Image (cartoon, grey):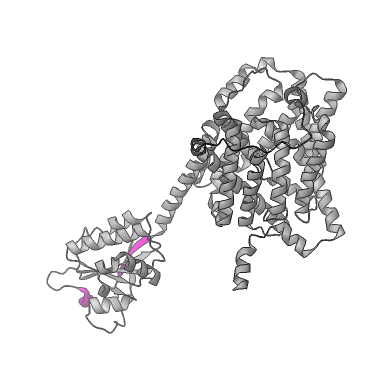
């Protein structure tokens, strides 16, 4: 009993606790410290850039990376996960802020954290793996396009008082403001992007975002360039964590209004964190705990909301950097957050010199990576249904809303899956294998027995087609034998369709006989009363016994009674 209880709760033990239990060495600690500092340098510009693009302050992004990153590394289900604000949330956050204000965002983040906690506790992490690839590709690429459109203003230094929240008006406003572009700002943005591309190409081990931001900042300071910076727009970065937020004023109406937004944050955080953990598994040979990972994501978002932060999740690029930098344990992720704390304490005044054009350049490259045009191109050659789902998810993300895109994409993919599954189930008309004189009614020459074999699950996706096939449009037999040996499962709709066929047959004085019914299905029939409708005496364990008792009227199975394929009618 104690062993069972231990194994039940063992999946909730964080990876960091297991690492502490297994022990560590000075060599592994040095590896973790080096990797953590490297990832902290990478996370520094990204956290600020994602926050600014979302409509928040750069300090908020840093605080989110510190608080959520520490919790995700300390309590997560993988040794290598690095958490914090990510590009996937930029559009969601900006939309929530525009509709519900920043207070609404904090409440939605808190609610999403609670949802993630529940999902992890209930072991629902594996369900998120069933969200189809075309859907995730569609909305991820759409997010990339939206992020790019939001950075045109700062990248080019356009004179736009208020950037529209919708894609087409935003592009139109940027196009109209192009004559006001500032050459200095545009030059800094281009310098950031080019330097990052060169670092990626020739010195991949050095964090490209940090190099780009550092170079743009040094040039801005050295030449005294007049361009908008973090200091000029936001007044710099505080050196202490903010006070906890009070949630005393939350109303029920606010909670109801924010449920769709919170659900979107929770689903997207779950998808991205588990995808990041899967990538980490592939790179390291490790295996993550999906339930524990979702619990950590929930705690991280709750913690971030308490201190007024942004939604957070596992970051694929930073996690991959962590592994490539030689990380050995969750200690590297904790060191990454301490690196950010050290920056706030020591280097916060320097952050005011960072030009917004440089951060925009970083995000433009992030947007390009997220857009994954090579995957879009590849999916266009996939089955038409998958291509359609991907394009609809992409277009809805860009032109309508990410929440709608995820919901519609998942529903469409589920419907297509059900359609494909229903096509796998068919009904074969079979020969009984009996001598013909045994199955012919000598009075009118009609077949006395007709046999159909059902192959595949009987579920709601093919129930109506089953009823249509069994419509008895030809001359009526006396007995129809339904061979169900290849039916692994039936749902309530499948049972209802079977009962419809049985009732229709009874009105035409046709006996329905079932053979080879799986015990699990027979139990369901018994609970629903289907066995009484067909008659317990008409349900047989195998085909030979069914035909022997209903056609030959004997208790001995006919030795030659083996159904053979005659023709096939697809359901």
Q: In which quarter of the image is residue 366?
A: top right
Most extreme residue toward the bottom is 556
Q: Can residue 375 be seen in this view?
A: yes
User: Viewer-proximal residue, 38 or 452?
Assistant: 38
Task: Give the magenta-colored segment's residue range.
Answer: 426-444
Whether the magenta-drawn stretch holds residue 439 is answered as: yes
Task: Give the total number of marks visible in the rendering.
Answer: 0
Q: Is residue 136 shown above or below 159?
A: below
Image point (72%, 36%), residue name: 242
Q: Position of residue 140 (x, y in %)?
A: 60, 40
Query: Left or right of 212: which side holds 438?
Result: left
Q: Position of residue 154 (x, y in %)?
A: 70, 24
User: Quarter of the image containing the C terminus?
Assistant: bottom left
Q: Quadrant of residue 161?
A: top right
Most extreme residue toward the left is 443
Query: Left or right of 94: which side holds 418?
Result: left
Q: Quadrant of residue 7?
A: bottom right
């Amino acid at each position: 009993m104690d062993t069972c209880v231990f194994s039940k709760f063992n999946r909730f033990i964080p990876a960091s606790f297991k690492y502490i239990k297994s022990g560590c060495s000075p060599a592994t600690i040095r590896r973790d410290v080096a990797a953590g500092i490297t990832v902290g340098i990478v996370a520094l510009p990204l956290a600020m850039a994602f926050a600014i693009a979302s409509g928040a302050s750069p300090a908020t992004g840093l605080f989110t990376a510190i608080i959520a990153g520490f919790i995700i590394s300390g309590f997560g289900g993988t040794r290598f996960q690095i958490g914090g604000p990510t590009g996937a949330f930029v559009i969601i956050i900006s939309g929530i802020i525009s509709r519900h204000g920043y207070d609404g965002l904090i409440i939605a983040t808190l609610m999403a954290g609670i949802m993630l906690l529940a999902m992890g506790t209930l072991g629902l992490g594996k369900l998120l793996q069933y969200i189809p690839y075309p859907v995730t590709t569609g909305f991820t690429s759409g997010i990339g396009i939206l992020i790019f459109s939001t950075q045109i203003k700062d990248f080019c230094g356009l004179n736009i008082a208020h950037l529209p929240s919708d894609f087409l008006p935003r592009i139109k406003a940027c196009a109209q403001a192009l004559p006001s572009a500032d050459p200095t700002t545009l030059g800094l943005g281009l310098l950031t992007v080019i330097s990052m591309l060169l670092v990626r190409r020739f010195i991949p081990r050095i964090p490209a975002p940090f190099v780009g931001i550092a170079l743009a900042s040094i040039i801005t300071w050295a030449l005294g360039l007049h361009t908008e910076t973090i200091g000029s727009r936001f007044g710099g970065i505080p050196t202490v964590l903010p006070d906890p937020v009070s949630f005393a004023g939350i109303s029920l109406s606010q909670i109801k209004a924010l449920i769709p937004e919170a659900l979107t944050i929770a689903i997207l955080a779950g998808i991205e964190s588990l995808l990041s953990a899967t990538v980490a598994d592939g790179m390291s040979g490790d295996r993550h705990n999906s339930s524990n990972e979702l619990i950590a994501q929930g705690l991280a978002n709750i913690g971030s909301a308490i201190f007024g932060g942004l939604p957070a999740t596992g970051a694929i690029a930073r996690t991959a950097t962590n592994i490539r930098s030689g990380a050995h344990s969750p200690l590297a992720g904790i060191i990454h957050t301490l690196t950010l704390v050290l920056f706030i304490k020591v280097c916060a005044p320097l952050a005011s010199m960072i030009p917004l054009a440089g951060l925009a350049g970083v995000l433009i490259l992030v947007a390009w990576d997220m857009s994954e045009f090579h995957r879009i191109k590849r999916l266009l050659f996939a089955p038409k249904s998958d291509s359609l789902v991907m394009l609809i998810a992409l277009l809805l993300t860009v032109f309508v809303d990410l929440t709608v895109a995820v919901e519609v994409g998942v529903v469409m993919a589920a419907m297509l899956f059900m359609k494909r599954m229903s096509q796998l189930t068919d009904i074969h008309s079979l020969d009984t294998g009996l001598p013909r004189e045994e199955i012919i009614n000598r009075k009118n020459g009609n077949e006395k027995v007709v046999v159909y074999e059902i192959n595949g699950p009987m579920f709601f996706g093919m129930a109506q087609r089953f009823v249509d096939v069994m419509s008895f449009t030809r001359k009526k037999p006396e007995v129809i034998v339904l061979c169900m040996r290849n039916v692994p499962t039936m749902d309530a709709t499948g049972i209802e369709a079977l009962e419809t066929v049985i009732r229709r047959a009874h009105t035409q004085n046709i006996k329905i006989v079932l053979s080879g019914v799986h015990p699990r299905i027979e139990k369901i029939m018994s609970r629903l009363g289907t066995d009484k409708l067909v008659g317990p005496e008409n349900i047989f364990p195998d085909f030979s016994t069914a035909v022997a008792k209903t056609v030959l009227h004997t208790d001995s199975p006919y030795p030659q009674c083996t159904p053979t394929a005659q023709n096939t009618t697809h359901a």
